[in-house]
Every structure is written in C-alpha cells, then in structure tokens.
Amino acid sequence: MKRLSYAFLLTALMSACNTVVLDPPAVDLLIDDIVFTTASDLPSVRIGLYSAARSIGSPTVQAGDFTADNIIHLGTFTDYRELGTKQITPSNGVVGALWGSVFRSIYLANFVLERLPTIASVRAADAKALTAEAKFLRGYANFIGAHTFGGIPKVTSTTLATNRTVPRASKEEILTWALEDFQAALADLPDGDPQDRNVFAGYATKNAARAALARYYLYQKNWAQAEAYATLLINSTNYSLVSYNDVVTKDFTQESIFEFGYTLNDYSGDINNYFVGRREVVPSNQVVVSLLSRESGNRSQTLVFDFTKQKGNDNGWTLRKYGTADESNRNFVIFRLGEMYLIRAEARAQQGKITGTTGAIADINRLRTRAGDGLDDSAKPPLITTATQTEMLSIIERERVYELAFEGHRWYDLVRTGRAQAVMSAFSTNWNVKYELWPIPQTEIQRNPSLVGQQNPGY
C-alpha cells in the first residue's frame, strides 16, 4: 500500500468524500484507497475536491482579518494570542492549518487531473467540466498560498518520491501557474444556472473564474485587466447588490459569485465560536469605529453590541457575519459583486479615471447608496462629488474595510498596497515587517529537507 507521508498532502478529507480512508493518526491519506476508476466514482470525487478546497475558507479569514488590525485577543489560546498581539511564530496552529488546507486542495486537484484521462467511461463533457473545476480550485489555492507565505512548493503530482522533497518555487512562479489555471478554467467551466443559487454560487462557473481573474490582476497591479474582468461581472444580469443585512445573514444571495458552502452537519462554526461562544477574540476598537462611521452606513450590521459582555478589555462588540450551524449564514463567501465594484474602483483610480460614469467615484457611490438604504438622510453615507487620485485611493482603502470586514481581505490589502507597515505599526508596537508574510510551518521544515534554511525572513 502506497502512503503519502508528506505533511501538507496528508490531511483528512471530510467524511462526505467516502472514497478516502483515514489511517490513525489522521495525518495519512492512503492514495490507493481513493477510488476513481469508473465514471460512477466521479460525483464522490467531485465532492472530495470541493471539500478539500473549502477547508481554505476559515484560515484565510483568520489570515486576512486576525493578522491585521481587526481583532483584539481576549482568550487563552496561544494561536490567537500570537495573531492578536502580532507575535506570530512558525508553530502557530492557524498558520499550519492554512498551509495544510492549501496543499490539501492542490493535492486533490492533482489527483483528479492525473486520474481523469485514464478513465475511458467518463463522458467527454463531464471530464472537461471536472478538469476545469480542479484547475480553478488549484489556482485559488496557489493564489492564497503565494500571497500568504510567498514562495511555496510547486506540487504538480501525487507522486510520493517527488513530493517528499519539493523545494520552494518563487512567488512569481506560483502566481504564474495560478493564472494559467484560472485561464484554463475560464475556457471550460460551465455558465451555470442562476435560477438555482445554491449550485450557481456553490460550484465553479465561468463567472467565478472571471472574479478570480479580476482579483488576481488587481493584486498584480494590472489595472486595465482588473477593471475589464470586474466590469464583466458588474454588467452581468445574473447578479445584483442585495441589502447589506442579507450579505451578513444569508448564504447564496443574488450578490454571491462563489462561496464555500456547508450544511448543518458539516459546519464547524469556528469563527462564530471564537467571537461569540468563547470570546477568544473580539472586533478591535479601530474596526468598530470604522464600521459605526457615517461613511460605513448600514454596513455597521456586520457587528452587534451586547452590553452584558462589556468588561475589562472586552468592548462588548461581536461579529454577525458567521452564524451557528442552524443559522443561514454558515458559508465563506469567496467572491461577490460588492468586491467587484471595489476592484473596479481601485483599478480605475490607479489609471486616473476618477470622475464620470466610468470613474472610480461612480463605483464607490454605488456601494454607498446601498449602504444608505433604510437610513435617515442625515445618517446616509455622503456621496463623493470630487477627489484627487490620492484622495480616491484613500477612500477606497476605507471603503474596503466597511464593505469587506471579516471576509479575509484586510491584511492582504495592506500588504499588496504597501500600507502594512504604516497602519500596523500604529496599531501594535509588536508589529514587524516580517509579518507581511506568514512563516512556513515549522513542522513542514522538519519534514521536508528542501525547506531547511528556506524560512521566511525574521522567523
């Protein structure tokens, strides 16, 4: 029996994919027992592919919001004390969880891509669609991995001998590979049926690939391409901005382009537990002030105040965006229409397109109009009439906090815009420039000799 012992390939898939056998301790995945030999195995393998990918959701939110200035740590867990106090170490469990989730997704995608061509009974159309889904999810995993850790191992197969010693590739090489996967996925993914929102937003479609490319090009500072792909989504008749309360409290809304979905039985509720159950972390005073500002408008609904919790360092505020298992906001939204407006606004501002119907101001005002729904005129966010390019970029930075708080963006935004050091050093005296990347997990360096001496600077 062939066993993969390389840690980042060997984390358990969710039980929904019953083609996987776990061998205690649950860090070994026996690839001979993943059954994909006939067309009848395709549905369960597809479930496994998405199950692996969605494990990226929670640790990415924690990377994006907990590493930044959005939380205060109150509890007793070392991992969250490190994130909250900006003293992150290579042994941090959340760091290890995200690394493992990234490579779990890459491994399952590689497995699908290797096996599919060998199964003659799979219909050509089904093989084409599943290949595109695997590439889309692998591209997303590599995108998150590269922007979190920098260069990461480029794992292209499921071969044990190779994967034991895969060295780090450069960040640029990994991102080039992610781009190739997104582009290939766009060509072959289905359009999807917008009448069934759970499936339309729960599985990869051409529009999900377009959203991924819009974000990809934004991060790469390819402003024209970012604007173009965001515009395709904004102009689509399949999406519309819903009430912000629905953004906070409902899954699979008309605004959602792609999200990782959960059921009552497989939702861990970890984010809800950290904020509500344990009070391990709470929204920082800075993000509370931002979300309660007039500019934010009804996006303050992201948070709720409970005076009974207010004591000591606990400011009494908590997060509403992730509910309990029996509530209707269990999912992690990966791409939604509100983000596309923000991507286009930033891309336009960077190109000097500020005013008029094709300028950044128009995009931000569209979001502010939504944020004023249900409010008295005196409380509605003020619409922008004029701004310089520098002013507009500052407005967009604030707007991304109001609109996307606790969706996993803040730290990545500060790093990609070169603002991390200025913002974070004002937030915490422990902030260090090394925290613009997460460390490679220490366990991975111990297991893979090619990673020895390759730790990110400062750790």
Image (cartoon, rainbow, N blue to C red):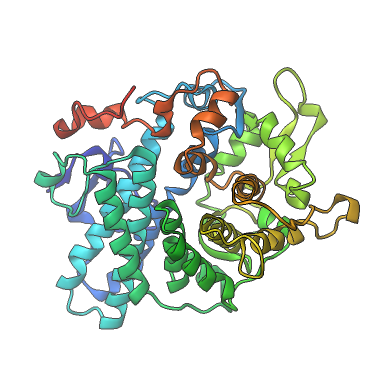
Q: Quadrant of the C terminus?
A: top left
Residue 133 place in picture, x, y as percent: 35, 67
Q: Residue at x 90, y 51 (%)?
A: 378
Residue 393 place in picture, x, y as percent: 59, 48
In the rendered picture of this protein, how many numbered marks are placed on residues? 0
Q: Could one spot residue 44 in this view of the protein?
A: no
Residue 282 place in picture, x, y as percent: 65, 31
Tell me the quarter of the picture where residue 40 sits: bottom left
Q: Residue at x 74, y 48 (%)?
A: 296
Q: Residue at x 41, y 58 (%)?
A: 222
- The residue lying toward the viewer, choosing from 136 and 223, is 223
Tell me the quarter of the picture where residue 182 sits: bottom left
- The residue lying toward the viewer, choosing from 452 and 295, is 295
Residue 307 place in picture, x, y as percent: 82, 30
- 272 to 214, vertically: above or below: above
- The residue lying toward the viewer, choosing from 224 and 420, is 224
- 1 to 364, vertically: above or below: above
- 307 to 101, vertically: above or below: above
Left or right side of 448 for 267: right
Left or right side of 220 for 454: left
Q: Could one spot residue 277 in this view of the protein?
A: yes
